[in-house]
Image (spheres, rainbow, N blue to C red):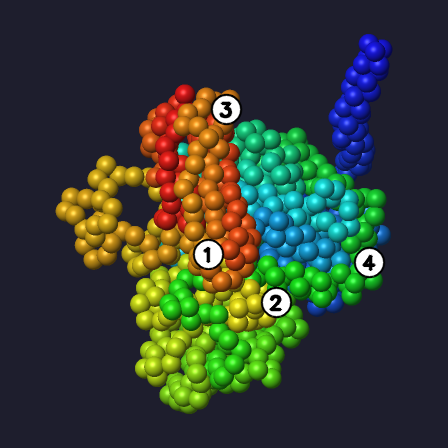
Amino acid sequence: MRIGRFLLTAVITASAFTAMAAPQADKDKMDQFIDNLMGKMTLQEKIGQLNLPVSGEIVTGQAKSSDVAGKIRKGQVGGLFNVKGVENIREVQKIAVEQSRLKIPLLFGMDVIHGYETVFPIPLALSCSWDMEAIKESARIAAKESSADGICWTFSPMVDICRDPRWGRMAEGGGEDPYLGSEISAAMVKGYQGDDLTDKNTIMACVKHFALYGAPEAGRDYNTVDMSHLSMFNNYFPPYKAAIDAGVGSVMTSFNVVDGIPATGNKWLMTDVLRDRWGFDGFVVTDYTAISEMIAHGMGDLQQVSAMSLSAGTDMDMVADGFLTTLEKSLKEGKVTMAEIDKACRRILEAKYKLGLFDDPYKYCDASRVKKDIFTAENRAVARKIATETFVLLKNENNLLPLQRKGKIALVGPLANTKANMPGTWSVAATSDKYNSLYESMKQSLAGKAEVFYAKGSNLMYDAQREAEATMFGREMRDLRSAQELLDEALSVASQADVIVAAVGESSEMSGESSSRTNLEMPDAQRDLLTALKKTGKPIVLVYFAGRSTVMTWEQENFPAILNVWFGGSEAADAICDVVFGDVSPSGKLTTTFPKNVGQIPLYYNHLNTGRPLEAGKWFSKFRSNYLDIDNDPLYPFGYGLSYTTFRYGDLQLSNNSMNEKGKITASVTVTNTGNYDADEIVQMYIRDMVGSVARPVKELKGFERIHLKKGESRTVSFDITAEQLKFYNSTLNWACEPGEFEVMVGGNSRDVQTKKFSLQ
């Protein structure tokens, strides 16, 4: 018996040793390969690996004679981005592996942000699904499609926390919450990279923008960021760290300053935090021309800022040509070291090795995969289903929605019959001729059952120049008829209908990069259209497109039903019809707070209290923290979203009212579907630390679960509370929890919750 136990123990020990030894053996093999390769490389070839130009002439088919091609032959390019098409990529890769001295393959990157040709909802919309498996699946499909077209590296996920919707790039992130943002960050990385980067269906992810890019002053893109280290570590850093913990292969720097130093040249950020504190072992790439932009920040000339960036821990220079043209001189002058150049070069080569490019440079160049893997019926079905999970029902007075498929419906609005605006910003591989506008989908959905009449009703806005700036990249939609002609047509159509569906809001490029706004209300021409439609007395459903939280106070006061559909991707039109006509109940919940007035911004749920808080239920109280002209409350709180059914929450129960650091408390609540539709609910748990060594937020999301309930069905949802969930970064930036009193809150959004108290001993 003892011998048997000994043998069993020996087998288990040997198996564990083998499991640990395998990754080390792989690393040793990689190190040996790269040591051997770098031993053959000249200084210029090492610096060349750090150079990432844009595709340039290559996209026009002039690859062989282009300046970029010449640099590839000389070993002066480490990768390219924005080369579209597997045959184009094969042609360029062939130059690298057949015409350069050392035949080092190139990386090919692209902004595959929320899908490839099958486009998923914008990331902000995806976050509103609170469905990590769906988000992971969207990234997996994006990786499969883009890899089939030659891409091996995506500049995603973008995980910048944003509390200011004036900033247009809110559309690309996961909202305002660091806990939810971290869950999304990890899911995206795992979706792109899978379990094995040598798998041809996976691509390397790049978390961005490190760091704090989502907190620019005044919400103006590329603007200054200035915040405390406490806020960085507690509120903004967690999603980046989650990506690192998930094994992300690369990190992109942000444009902004951090502690007065541009992120790209910030050694504390890129080395002390990212590598030494978090253990990141991948490579760091700049954002577009971020090195040369440091000149405008006042950091020096191109040679100085390039040396500063390399020494800080930046490995790859996107487009600026700073590394390529100045590092050799800086080395001779002692401004950088050979060790710094070698470190950066090694990291780029390691990425290529991990992707399997040295084994097969054409691994991603199998042209037969294009038809088999891209924009398939299966992928589109997944995208359509996920899109329905992202829509947020903001209002549904007298259960106007869902509409029945009968009678006559007027579809009106500048976004009702446009294909190009459906997928949203940063849908670089979208082919809009392959999918429907909302009008086309609605006609198909109602065929043989109801009539649908369409009129544009208005342009996006009155100012043609402003509209042109908001509809770039081939997404122009201006109608040259007069405003009165457009309105008259809409009123004529509305007069024939039983109900009006108004497709209004932002165009896709009214949010995204370089799309900051100071006025977040409905654009003027659309507001006038809605005002005129309201006078008809017909019931109106607003289908609202947006890439950020907007100010919808007027809409909330004047219209009975509002469905916020964000930008839902290539299958958005069909998905909208699925929800509007009741095939699917809306289940999305907001991940960003909606203000009543732009003057409330930044407005977010997990704020600190003040010494003079306004009493609950009061509008204004002198010498309290409030406004003269509006109350403090948001229009729609974080976590908010209605359903076609109703849910009843039973009493919140705690398994205990006290625990120590090694224990746990289970919070449980029974949720019942009391309505007439099968539907999903997102149950949310928040915690408040009542007394801390530093001021703590009034509540913080610490758990959630998306559940499906058939009508009449009940389910008990339980959350385990451990000491880990009570930890925060204290004044010395240590990750720790403190004994004391806490509140746990559970409900369907951050406002409507039940509360219980417990203590940590």
Query: In the image, what residue type sits under mark 1?
Result: Thr
Residue 723 at x, y percent in the picture = 48, 27
Residue at image position (35%, 42%) is 607
Query: In the image, what residue type sits under mark 2?
Result: Ser
Q: CA distance from mark 1 to mark 2?
A: 34 Å
Disc 3 or 4, which lies upstream in sequence?
Answer: 4
Q: CA distance from mark 3 to mark 1?
A: 35 Å
- Quarter that holds the C terminus: top left
Disc 1 or 2, which lies upstream in sequence?
Answer: 2
Q: CA distance from mark 1 to mark 4?
A: 52 Å
- SS at badge 2: loop
452 horizontally vs 321: left or right: left
648 horizontally vs 445: left or right: left
Residue identifier under label 2: 570
Residue 237 at x, y percent in the picture = 49, 39
Q: CA distance from mark 3 to mark 4?
A: 53 Å
Mark toward the viewer: 3 or 2:
3
Write down the quadrant of residue 374 in the picture. Answer: bottom right
Front residue of 68/112: it is 112
- Quarter that holds the N terminus: top right
86 horizontally vs 174: left or right: right
Residue identifier under label 4: 366
Write down the quadrant of residue 250 in the picture. Answer: top right
Q: Farthest left residue?
A: 622
Q: CA distance from mark 3 to mark 2?
A: 47 Å
| Residue 663 numbered mark, or none | 3
Mark toward the viewer: 3 or 1:
1
| Residue 674 numbered mark, or none | 1
Residue at image position (71%, 36%) is 346
- SS at badge 1: loop
Q: Is residue 392 above or below residue 450?
A: above
Disc 2 crowd, CA 10 A, few/some/many (<14, 14-19, 20+): many
